[in-house]
Image (cartoon, rainbow, N blue to C red):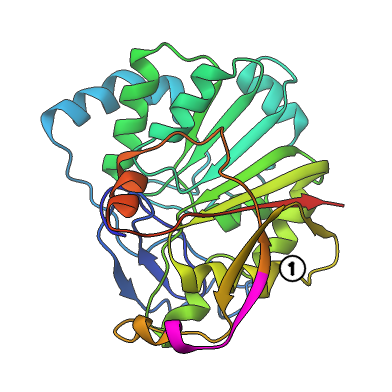
Amino acid sequence: MTDEKTDLTVADAATGDADGAARTAAPADVTPQGHPMHRVLSFVRRSARLDARLQRAWDAYAGRYLLDLNAGEGSLDVRDGFVLDAAFAERTWGNANPLVVEIGTGQGENVVAAAAAHPELNFLAVEVYDPGIAHTLLLAGKQDLRNLRVAQVNAPELLKATADATLAEVWTFFPDPWPKKKHHKRRIVQPTLAAEVHRALAEGGVWRIATDIEDYALHVHEVMDGLDGWRNLGKLTVSLPTGHVGKGNADLARDMPHADFAESERFDGRILTNFERKGLDAGRVIHDFTYLRV
């Protein structure tokens, strides 16, 4: 699906579109000292061009909602020495309420709606695409939300900078599917990121994932279902092909052997965004996952 949201990817960086930005892959050949060669990144390119309405929203609300976590001007790296821990959260949100992080918030529709519906929770929207950030600021500012903040940094780096057991939930809704088979390694749901999410979650915390791409659903099961420290809470039985397909030959999946997998009912805390509605209109099936940290 392609329209409104930036995604976060693995290995090479790219712009994504889990709720909408255009996908443009590019290799990341240089990695900072101390990082593995194929580190998890969020993107390669982000637009600095905002229309007048979004620029006004940025000017009006960035000081209130956008956290200053970056290594420098224009950088999406988290600055050295930053730690997202309970003390930082209490200073930032002014309370000790549970903290939910959404990775790849796109236009901000979902995270803003969740923050408005749950004032007893704190929310951190993680996004890299400028228009998406600005739109999230606009929606949050219009509602005068007090329990939402925004971080424009690489999500995997932010998770690495998160202290153990700090987060109540992590959400990753409609990540970039990277449809070409040779690019499947770039998908954000990988064992390395799962380890960081597991460490950052408090006991009993959950990682919620959703995708409208059948092949990505299989990928999530392959990565997550066998990992120690996670329990798939899904109660629905879903039949999926057991082989992977790529862009241009997805129709081959129909004739492949299938197997049953456990998935969750639709998360009622996720509103129906324009992006998800387009997927449904196109006949895609939404796959929801809830993995409990144990």
Asked if the stretch drawn in magenta spans residue 99, the answer is no
Asked if the stretch drawn in magenta spans residue 255, the answer is yes
> Around disc 1, counting alpha carbons within 10 Å, would you say few (fewer than 14), some (14 to 19), or many (20 or more)?
some
Q: Specify the quadrant that holds the N terminus.
A: bottom left
Q: Can residue 185 be seen in this view?
A: yes
Of residue 205 and residue 251, the one placed in the foreground of this image is 251
What residue is disc 1 on?
A: 225
Of residue 118 and residue 62, the one placed in the foreground of this image is 118
Q: Residue drawn 43% across and 45% down?
A: 127
Position of 90 relative to 173 (above/below):
above
Of residue 224 and residue 69, the one placed in the foreground of this image is 224
Based on the displayed image, in which of its 4 quarters is residue 202 positioned?
top right
Residue 107 rendering spot, x and y as whole percentages? 33, 39
Position of 226 relative to 234 (above/below):
below
Q: Residue drawn 41% across and 63% down?
A: 176
Based on the displayed image, in which of its 4 quarters is residue 27 positioned?
bottom left
Q: Residue furthest top?
A: 144
Residue 5 rendering spot, x and y as whole percentages? 34, 49
Q: Residue drawn 16% across and 26% down?
A: 53
Position of 246 relative to 154 (above/below):
below
Q: In the picture provided, is 47 more to the left or to the right than 173?
A: left
Residue type, numbered disc 1: Asp
Q: Can residue 39 be seen in this view?
A: no
Q: Is mark 1 on a helix, strand or loop?
A: loop
Residue 136 rendering spot, x and y as whole percentages? 36, 31
Magenta highlight range:
253-260
